[in-house]
Structure formats: C-alpha cells, structure tokens
Amino acid sequence: MNVVSVKRALISVSDKTGVADFARELSALGVEIYSTGGTRKHLLEAGVQAQEVAEYTSFPEMMEGRVKTLHPKIFGGILCRRDNAEDMHSVREHGMSEFDVIVVNLYPFEATIAKPNVTQADAIENVDIGGPSLVRASAKNHAFVAIATKPTQYQQILAELKEQGGTTLALRQRLAAEAFAVTAAYDRAIADYFAKQFCGAEADETITLSLSRVTKLRHGENPHQAGAIYALAGSRGANIVSAKQLNGKELSYNNLLDLDSALGIVRAFTQPAAVVIKHNNPCGAAIATSLCEAAQKALDGDPLSAFGGIVGFNRTVDVATAELLSTPGLFLEAIIAPDFDPAALEILKTKPKWKANVRLMQAGSLDNAPAARRFRQVEGGMLVQDADWGDDPQSEWKVATEAQPTEAQWHDLKFAWTMVRPVKSNAIVVAKDGMLLGTGAGQMSRVDSVEIALKKAAERGVGAVLASDAFFPFPDSIHKASAAGIAAIIQTGGSVKDNDVIAACNEHNLPMVLTGRRHFSH
C-alpha cells in the first residue's frame, strides 16, 4: 500500500473552488499549510492559517508574481527521494522541508484566449510557469508526493488521510497520471495559440487533440461495444458535450449522435426552427413565425418516423410547444433546445406518459458559431476538414432555365438548400412552405434518393421544391420530379450532362437554380 503520512502541504491555485474547506480539514488533521500571495490571502480570510512561501524560502515574490515558487527550497522539498540517503542529506544541509501534498491548478489560459479581443500581452501573462513546474515535479516524485490539480480530487485525498493515515501509492499514481494529462493539455492549448499567432500556414503541421472523459456510456452503437463521451479541450459555445441534462434517463451513444445533428441543423436558421432526427437524418423539419408552429410542421413532415425521434429547437421551448410535444400517442427519445421556460419544463417532465425517460437537454445560447474544423478517425490517422456550416453566397446562384422561380418558390428553395446539407449523401429533400416533406438519404444512386424523397412527400409534393446536395448526372431524376408535381429544383450543377438536365427542366417548364457549391455529407 506504501502509505505516506502528510505533514506539509503547499497550496497555490487560480481556481479557488473548495480550497479553503480542503485546507481547513488538512489543518485539522495536523498538516502545515504553505501558500502564496492570492491563495494565502484567500485562506487567511477563510480563517485558515498558512505560512507564506516567501518566508520559508527567504526570497520574496517578485516581478508581479511571475517568480514566487521557483526556488530550490520548494522543488528540493518536492523532488527529494525519501529513501535516498544523498537526497535527504541535501534536504538537511540546506534547511529544506519535505512537501507531501501539492495543490496546484493553473492560470486560466484557455479562458483568457476565449475572451473577445484578447491581446497577446494578456495571453502571455496567463502562461503559467511555476504552476506546471510544481505539478510535473510532484507527479514525477509520486512515490512520495500527492498532487491535486482539480477540486474534485480534494475529497479523495481527505478520505485516505482519515482512513489510512496518509496517501496510498495507488492514489498518488492516479493523481500523477491525471496531473501529467493536465499539463499536456495546457501546453497544447498554449502551443496551438502561439502557432496560430506566429506560424501562419505552418500551424497545422502537427495537431494534438486533448480529450477529457466526461462519462462512460451504457454502451456504444450496439450493446456489445463499450462507449464513452469526451470533451475536447478549447471547445466553446452550445454543444452536446456541455449541454445540461434536465430530465430523463441516461443518454446513449446514438442519442448523442442524433442530438448533435439536431443542434447543428436548427442553428442554421434565424427564424424559429424545429427538426426531428431519426438515425442521424432529419425526417421532419420546419421554420415558422412561432416555435410551436415550426414544431407542428416538423412532426407532420413524417409522423411515422417521428415516433421515437430526437427533436431539436433553436429557441427556448415555451408552454405552447411543450403542450404540443405532450400530445397523447407521441413518443420522443430526447429534446434539445437553448433553454426551456420553467412552466414548459414542468409540463414535459410531468405530463407525457414517458415523462421519466424523456431526455431534456439545455444547450445554451446558439449565438456562437460551431467549431471551424471537423475531425474523423480513419484507421491509422484522422481526416481533417473545414466545417461545412457557413452561408452559401446567394449572389453566386443562377437560374439556368427559361422558367424563373416565384417569390414563394425562392423561399422554399433557400429552405430546402439549407436542409439538404446535413442529410447523408446521396441527399435529396422535398420541401414546401418552409416544411420538410420528404428525405432521400444515403443511397448509392441519386435517382434512388429522388424516388424515396418523392415517395415520402407523396401528394404533398405537388407544388413543392426539390434540392440535391450534388449535381444530377442524368436527366432521369428531373423527369421523375416533374411527374410527381415538383415545381422547382435547386442543385449544384457542374455535371457534363448539365445541358441535358437543363433541357429536361425546360421541357417540363421547371425553374432550376444552380448554386455552384456541393454539400456531400458522408
């Protein structure tokens, strides 16, 4: 077990959450507390006695706090090997004291660079030097020293001091591993920032992703697969990892994938928007003047598929929308939105029969843009690309046909073009009056996707518009769309058969808009 008794602790933290209570309990157990400027002041104000590090080292803090713990009497007391006679002779010769617990968390570098208009000077001042040095020294000498880098670790240490009379090797090893992960992530954030500031195009030659496990999942996509969700260091804005669960049972791997898709779709709209996701594709979606109306239209898009689906909104869920979602016979797996009105939340938690299980996810404001890059693991490495969420410049669109879209059709074409982007390729959507009527997704043949979308829309597709995420290689899809009553088409263009496709549209008096930009989503 190799229990090390604790006589002295050095505490120097930026995040002071819980540190006064921790230090108070350490002191009650007979542990001497040593601390530095701001932390010591915080402890003294909380009634916890702490010796000033500068008094112990006989060397004052200087340079506005840049130099305070960087001293041989500190690092010698941390790095000395208690079972090494020469080390312990040096400790006695130079009047050092051994430190058994080190409590350090680092300057908030990532929070600083996330601020609007942060200056390089601010960023540089938040590069911690002494903190990481203390952490690494303590973790290196974990055979004798326990290093706490997070407030969540305080109770683990206290529990062992009370139960074991000191820290066990198993705990010190675990804390050391977590400590090295902290400094690695911290240094990576700093390296990324300075690479972007100073290295230009060379900044992406090396990419290191720092991921911290948030929680284990019941399983992965299937019950025989283990699963977990990790937070990517530096991620900001609304996302499923930081979203707060307000109700319901544990989220599954597949729930999280669908919630991510739902959030990505609704944040693309400025009007009140709703989407219903099933197996990572939208089966219903709509925009309207109110959230409740958008929700109704989204659910009506494909009622059969909507059963057991994931619903996403880009507005706070209000009472009217909550009442709609509580309709008898409707079952939903999860709902994600920026927020929920208190009364709406109460309805969703108590009114439906499935109240105990429905996951209600509060994502927060959608004002921040999503991540600029996307990563996908492949065997042996990662594929990296720019995220496909920016607006397509409508100034680059052109009507390629003799017939011109009406004003109402233009509105529907824009909606359909936004909706076809997240659908898995080959992707076709049919829409009318700001409402998704049919989706053809993931087919090996584009004409098969057309047929599926038209079948889903059925008679509602008469007068609707059709969007394709890439060009039509042949005019056969145009003939099928016209036969089903489609009134206008939007696609990328760029096929060697464009003239044949345009001729087919002219034959059927169908307006067709070419965007010049493809939106594959594999």
Image: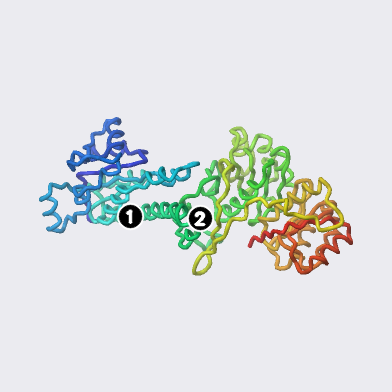
Which label belongs to residue 499? none
**For this rendering, which residue is in front, 267 or 284?**
267
Q: CA distance from mark 1 to mark 2?
A: 24 Å
Q: Which residue is mark 2?
A: 218
Q: Position of residue 31 (x, y in %)?
A: 21, 41
Q: Residues within 10 Å of mark 2 (few under 14, many from 20)?
A: some
Q: Amino acid at mark 2?
A: Arg
Side (left or right) of 339 relative to 37? right
The quadrant of the rendering that contains the N terminus is bottom left
Q: Position of residue 142 (x, y in %)?
A: 26, 55
Q: How is the image coloured?
A: rainbow
The quadrant of the rendering that contains the C terminus is bottom right
Q: Is residue 25 above or below residue 189?
A: above
Which label belongs to residue 174? 1
Q: Is residue 276 visible?
A: yes
Q: Is residue 316 above or below residue 87?
A: above
Name the residue rendered at 64%, 57% in the picture: 279
